[in-house]
Image: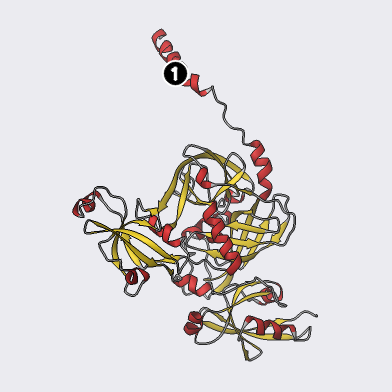
């Protein structure tokens, strides 16, 4: 018994001695100062469903906080296929943070995806209806705006200065519990995730749960270094693996969304794969660095620049390509049209190609919901924020139309939603946003106008009453 006690005391001397030489950080001041700039985001989506329960699992309570989890993983709500379709409101929760004192807010794209209404609640309990400025699904970053001045805002830090093992803090609304503070350390940097080629994620062990999405990740200086975006989980809850989008990536995306409503990226038009030791041996390479080109699209920038299948890209525009995941980020961050040097290995010989980087084509979903061109989020008389369609969208639609970026006021009350396309006003075709807004402005107050609206495969007239001038 005495021997066991001595042994235990020895262990205490070994492990307890160094641990007490440095105190653990105090997060109270950080939470108090930065919590006011963190917001709760409540999203409402009007969807079509059958006559049965809309919850994804039987006997599950109707908990709105779980909606964010289902939205993230795309879990459909079951219904009786024979029952008549009816509209119902789906609600979900997320987090965000105020980027500027005039009301611009960063969050995740999946938080506000297909939202019909976005409500932002501040820590002082004030609520605002938010406009969606834009969203980028590839990085999962969205920019929204509320009307306000002198609002509390975050300070942006440098995620590149983060060190593995450094303390970090998250503030958000897990399961709707507002301004919840959790802490942990940076577990890894530059983490590549499946299907997430454009974000070098910050991995942490900070407790993140459904509802935390879109909230800030702070360093101990109280600076935002990331946006909490994803967790790895087999249960749907926190399991010690959380991933944040570096704030510099998010700021670049938000600046583009603010100026043009969309994000442009560089594009080569190639397929790539990781180089294994076996492949390196077969190519006569000394290491596994680089990205192996598996195919080249005909007529693509890579094809025109001379890249071939079997080439190994070792440097792009002066940036070292250590892993295949490094290349999409480097290319995506390049301005389309820029001529860049690309260093390759071809049959064991090094050479440098000069390639004019193209613009990445839009995804099918993005092409349907993100028109190009200059964009200023201006709300017209009936509460619509509109954008002209792209030539590609007009061709697909077979006619002119105006994309509904946001719907508020009388238009929203009449049933017009974000994502609808306005085809006409009182039997006249909608030619442009400018022409449409002038027509609306010239109609006497109290009148009702008929808007021809395209929604998916359905076309319908929607009557909207005008307020007095």
Q: Quadrant of the N terminus?
A: top left
Would residue 270 be seen by someone viewing this image from the given angle?
yes
| Residue at point 70%, 76% (across, down) | 380
- Whole-percent x, y for residue 94 in the image: 58, 55
- Whether 149 is drawn above or below 339: the answer is above
Disc 1 packing (10 Å; few <14; some 14–19; many ≥20): few
Q: Quadrant of the C terminus?
A: bottom right
- Whole-percent x, y for residue 435 in the image: 66, 85
Left or right of residue 287: residue 247: right
- Whole-percent x, y for residue 342 in the image: 35, 60
Front in this rendered view, residue 189 or 116:
189
The quadrant where residue 7 appears: top left
Reading the image, the residue beneath label 1 is 14
Residue that lies at the very extreme toward the top in this rendered image: 2
Left or right of residue 254: residue 285: left
**How has the structure been colored for display?**
secondary structure
The quadrant where residue 318 appears: bottom left
| Residue at point 47%, 60% (across, down) | 333
Front in this rendered view, residue 396 or 276:
276
Would residue 112 be seen by someone viewing this image from the given angle?
no
Q: Secondary structure at mark 1?
A: helix
The quadrant where residue 91 appears: bottom right
Front in this rendered view, residue 12 or 88:
12
- Whether 176 is drawn above or below 448: the answer is above
- Whether 442 is drawn above or below 46: the answer is below
- Whole-percent x, y for residue 65 in the image: 58, 54
Left or right of residue 121: residue 86: left
Front in this rendered view, residue 240 or 414:
240
């Amino acid at each position: 018994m005495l021997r066991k006690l001595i042994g235990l005391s020895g262990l205490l001397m070994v492990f307890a001695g160094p641990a007490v030489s440095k105190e653990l950080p105090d997060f109270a001041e950080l939470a108090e100062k930065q919590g006011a700039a963190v917001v709760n985001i409540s999203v409402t989506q009007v969807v079509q469903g059958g006559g049965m329960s809309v919850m994804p699992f039987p006997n599950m309570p109707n908990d709105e906080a779980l909606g964010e989890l289902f939205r993230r993983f795309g879990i459909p709500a079951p219904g009786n296929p024979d029952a008549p379709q009816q509209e119902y409101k789906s609600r979900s929760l997320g987090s965000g943070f105020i980027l500027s004192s005039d009301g611009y807010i960063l969050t995740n794209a999946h938080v506000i995806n297909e939202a019909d209404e976005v409500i932002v609640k501040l820590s002082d309990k004030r609520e605002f209806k938010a406009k969606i400025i834009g969203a980028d699904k590839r990085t999962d970053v969205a920019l929204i705006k509320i009307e306000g001045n002198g609002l509390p805002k975050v300070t942006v830090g440098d995620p590149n200065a983060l060190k593995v093992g450094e303390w970090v803090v998250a503030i958000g609304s897990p399961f709707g519990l507002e301004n919840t503070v959790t802490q942990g350390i940076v577990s890894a940097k530059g983490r590549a995730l499946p299907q997430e080629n454009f974000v070098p994620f910050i991995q942490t062990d900070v407790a993140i749960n459904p509802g935390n999405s879109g909230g800030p990740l702070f360093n101990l200086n109280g600076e935002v270094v990331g946006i909490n975006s994803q967790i790895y989980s087999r249960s749907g809850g926190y399991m010690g693996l959380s991933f944040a989008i570096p704030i510099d990536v998010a700021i670049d995306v938000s600046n583009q969304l603010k100026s043009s409503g969309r994000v442009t990226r560089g594009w080569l038009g190639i397929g790539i794969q990781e180089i294994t030791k076996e492949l390196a041996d077969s190519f006569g390479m000394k290491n596994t660095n680089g990205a192996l080109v598996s195919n080249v699209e005909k007529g693509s920038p890579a094809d025109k620049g001379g890249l071939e299948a079997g080439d190994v890209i070792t440097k792009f525009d002066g940036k070292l390509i250590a892993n295949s995941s490094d290349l999409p980020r480097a290319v995506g961050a390049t301005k389309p049209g820029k001529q860049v040097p690309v260093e390759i290995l071809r049959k064991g010989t090094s050479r440098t190609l000069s390639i004019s980087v193209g613009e990445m084509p839009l995804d099918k979903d993005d092409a349907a919901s993100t028109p190009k061109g200059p964009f200023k989020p201006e709300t017209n008389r009936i509460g619509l924020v509109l954008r002209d369609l792209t030539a590609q969208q007009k061709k697909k639609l077979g006619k002119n139309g105006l994309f509904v970026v946001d719907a508020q006021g009388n238009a929203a009350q009449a049933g017009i939603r974000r994502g609808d396309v306005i085809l006409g006003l009182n039997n006249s075709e909608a030619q442009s946003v400018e022409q449409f807004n002038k027509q609306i402005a010239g109609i006497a107050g109290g009148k009702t106008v008929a808007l021809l609206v395209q929604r998916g495969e359905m076309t319908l007239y929607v009557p909207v009453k005008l307020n007095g001038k």
